[in-house]
Image: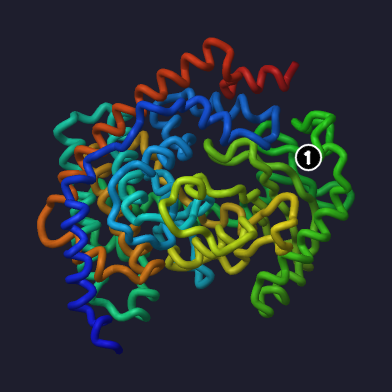
Amino acid sequence: MAENNTLEKRIKAGRALRVNVPRSSHGDVGNVTKRDPISLLEESSAGRVKRLVPLRYGRMLVSPFAFYRGSAIIQAHDLATTPHTGLVQPICGDAHLMNFGGFATPERNFVFDINDFDEAHPGPWEWDVKRLAASFVVGARHLGFEPAATDELVFNAIENYRIRMTDLASMGELDLWYEKMTFDYMLQNAKYEEGRKGIAKAIEKAQSRTQGSLLRKMAEKINGKWIMHDAPPDLFHIQGRSTLFEADEDWAQLDLQAALSNMLKNYLTTLSPSHRELLGRFQVQDVAFKVVGVGSVGTRCLALLMTDIHDQPLFLQVKQAVPSVLARYVPVGKSPFKHEGQRVVFGQRMMQSASDMFLGWNGGSGATVRHFHIRQLRDMKFSAEVETLSELTFGRYAWLCCDILARAHARAGGLAPEISGYLGKSGQFAEALVSYANSYADQVERDFQAFRDACRSGRLAAQTEADFGADLHM
């Protein structure tokens, strides 16, 4: 290895970045006064299924925390005017606390990791840490935690990111790539009884969320074929009686079978030969539109049901990949991929400790009208029920998220020595992030008020789940 690539020199290079970007400067929230959050939301809703956009806004109206989850574009805009070290690498792009969770690896180990990469894109590593830190404060306020306790948990979590990055900087590349956080490990090392009970409950719940258990809940066999239930707005057939597509939308007139066949043909080229062979042992039974999340509501997402000769199911999620909200705002570092689905898959494979063996994209080139990425639907997937967490368990959860984010950054960018050198051995960065997270949470509350006013005035059409369901019933 060349002398200028030694570990010590790279750590020193990271330390030198403090001259132009002091760690204390990260308390700055950027220029948040000269932008209209409503215009940014309208921009992010363009091209979505028209009937579902009010549902998206309705879900965001529930609380500032829900609004924060659905408005990544606003913070991306704001982060563009904040200080950063210039260390640009693949980042998650939407690393809030609800985008972490449990899932099964191909070897059926149950691991905790980042689980959403829709916004994955090259960018400053600090942006992920700031979005995560702010989500801790917005979430803690949602749960009514005391400010002092919130500051402490944010500080401890960000400090863990720093400490973990120092450890990762000394690890070999293969050791880093093999690093995983399993629920069995967490259960064995939990310090508090409350935490142990929560982890055991998560394991039990995940083990019940299999493809087989999902089949009976989502579908029934009619005339020898499995058909998914229409349950709008969450699940509906695109061209059935329960469709939420308006007559003038392209998917309302789509030759669905031809489009699905072409998509699967292209998707297969993105899988390994062995997984292509495995998928070839399943036959398509049904496909339906599935509404997911908060920020993704209105983007096109399908649930694809397949079965093998034993009538055992495989559910795939076919999710639209639109340009990352970061794309317009990153200072340097464009995505090398013209296909947005490939961008998402690359980000997931680089940052996640173990990825779904059916993870792929729908192939094609930049000329493809819409891009999609594909993975298994819900197989042993688990998300924390944040509303049930005490201050203690919320703090431990935040600590864990920062642990995972540090590993994801070190793995994806190979810049752990530089980041570690920059962060150093003190809590200055963590102190700055506590300040940033509180100030940005204040801004989120102001933006939420502006959003609520826009919904009340009619500038934005919003419907709650209940109102949306009532309209469907009528």
User: For residue 277, what is the image quadrant?
Assistant: bottom right
Q: Mark 1 belongs to which amino acid? A: His
User: For residue 311, what is the image quadrant?
Assistant: bottom right
- In the rendered image, residue 122, in percent from the top left (x then y), is placed at 45, 58
- In the rendered image, residue 255, in percent from the top left (x then y), is placed at 88, 48
Q: Is residue 441 left or right of residue 358?
A: left
Question: According to the image, label 1 marks what residue?
Answer: 237
Q: Is residue 203 visible?
A: no
Residue at image coords 43%, 19%: 450
Disc tally is 1
Q: Assign a secondary structure to mark 1.
A: loop
Position of 258 relative to 411 (above/below): above
Residue at image coords 50%, 25%: 38
Q: Residue furthest top?
A: 457
Position of 437 relative to 174 (above/below): above
Residue at image coords 80%, 34%: 249
Residue closest to the eye, 45 or 464: 45
- In the rendered image, residue 414, in percent from the top left (x then y), is placed at 35, 71
Residue closest to the eye, 394 or 161: 161
Position of 447 relative to 395 (above/below): above
Q: Is residue 465 left or right of residue 142?
A: right
Q: Is residue 303 left or right of residue 61?
A: right
